[in-house]
Amino acid sequence: MIEQNNSFSSYHNLSISLFILVTLLLGITACNQQNQVQENISEQPIPTQTPESDLTLNDVTLEEASEEGQMLWRVKSQRASYLQNQELIRVTKPEGELFQDGKVTYKITALQGEVYQDGNKIILIDEIEVYDIQNKVVIRGQQLEWLTEPGIIIVTNNITGSNEQVQASAQKAKVISKEKKIEFYGQVVAMIKEPVLKIQTEQLFWQIEPKKLLTNQPIKIEQLQDKKVIGSAYGDESEYDLDNKIATLKKNVQLLQTDPKVQISSELVTWNMPQNLITSPGPITVLEQEEKVVLKANQGQGNFQNNTFNLSGNVIGVGQNNQAQLNSDRLTWYFENQTFEAQGNVFYRQVDPPFNVRGPRAVGQLENEKVTIEGGSSNVVTEIIPQ
């Protein structure tokens, strides 16, 4: 539908509206010419045509509705020129609205654009802004393609997207209104405001509901404090829960903590930011970088609020400098003083001086080879290895 100064009634089909608009414009022009002859008034301007256009009007409103009569979109423009041979309307400073279930969901502005006569595609360029009314998300760029019937908006060239939680930049963004999702592509950088995180990947899906960031591409997540990196994570897939502030990383996962200096490797890790917990339900390797101690187990959880790491299932601890090794069913590592507590089928072996010892429980330090096996003499077995 097209309106000029709100003087025309609604029409369902855009091409029909244009035909009626041309007819009305011819009538308006003839009437104005007659008035000029009778009243000799030349001060009243009328819509003019540009060389490439068949019809030009000011203050125009274009609309499109579904077969059921439900509004799909509306575009208001300061100036509109109809090009019949290209079957499109060029608009100046357009202001658009995208409807979902009869309600305005997105507002869009630009400096110029093109509305195609079939009503299924709109192209906007220069200073694009897309505003998600319900979720208060703003997307900006320099070029936009609006596929009106599926309700998809594609923004390219210098893309940014933000709300009160997230600020993202990319080479391309796709807004899918029915799925309440924004997809970012190409050199994606997303900043999370609380806690302060920097996310880098090549593809990122922002689910507005239920407030998650997802990717199936390699990703890097950095946690910042006073503009310094205090923790980072890498993985081939990731999901970040914006409400609960929990990152889940999968496949070739690496986590690095600066205090204490720890490197964690696994295939599946959850990183709970508020509780400062790192959990792996599967095989995990922990490298304690200060003392060069490697810990391996079937599963584990690091609590960096109290500087401990709990491991269970086929636990192996190795001091890399002296090659002392500890095996047990369960182990708690204390980062602050580099000590451990091991329980269940404890086996300790060291190279210099060489000896092995077994027992139900052990405490000590691997690097200093200070290990105490506990559990009573009947449960402890010591093997002396001759030189």
Image (cartoon, rainbow, N blue to C red):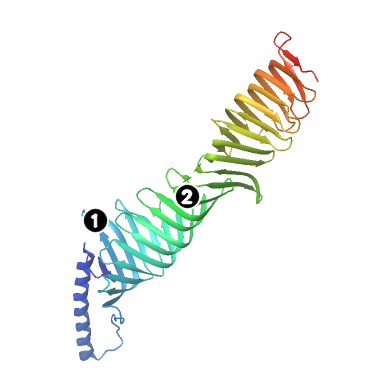
Percent across and percent down for residue 347 are 68, 19
x and y percentages locating residue 56 in the rendered image: 29, 77
> In front here: 284 or 357?
357
Please tell me which residue lies in front, 245 or 337: 337
Q: Which residue in the structure is indicated by mark 1?
A: 66
Residue 192 seen by the camera: no
**Mark 2 belongs to which amino acid?**
Leu
- Look at mark 2 in the image and give the residue it sits on: 204
The residue sitting at 47% across, 50% down in the picture is: 204
Q: Where is residue 167? Give x, y as percent.
A: 52, 54
State which mark lies toward you, 1 or 2. 2
Q: Earlier in the sequence, mark 1 or mark 2?
A: 1
Task: Report the side of 38 relative to 291 (left or right).
Answer: left
The type of residue carrying mark 1 is: Ser
Is residue 202 shown left or right of residue 63? right
- Asked if residue 48 lies left or right of residue 187, the reply is left
Q: Classify mark 2: helix, strand or loop.
A: strand
Outermost residue toward the front in this view: 387
Which image quadrant: the C terminus?
top right
* Spot occupied by residue 63 in the image (x, y as percentages of width and height): 28, 63
Q: Is residue 231 visible?
A: yes
Q: Can you tell which quarter of the image residue 50 is in?
A: bottom left
Local crowd size for mark 2, using a 10 Å CA cut-off: few (<14), some (14–19), many (≥20): many
Residue ranking furthest to the top: 378
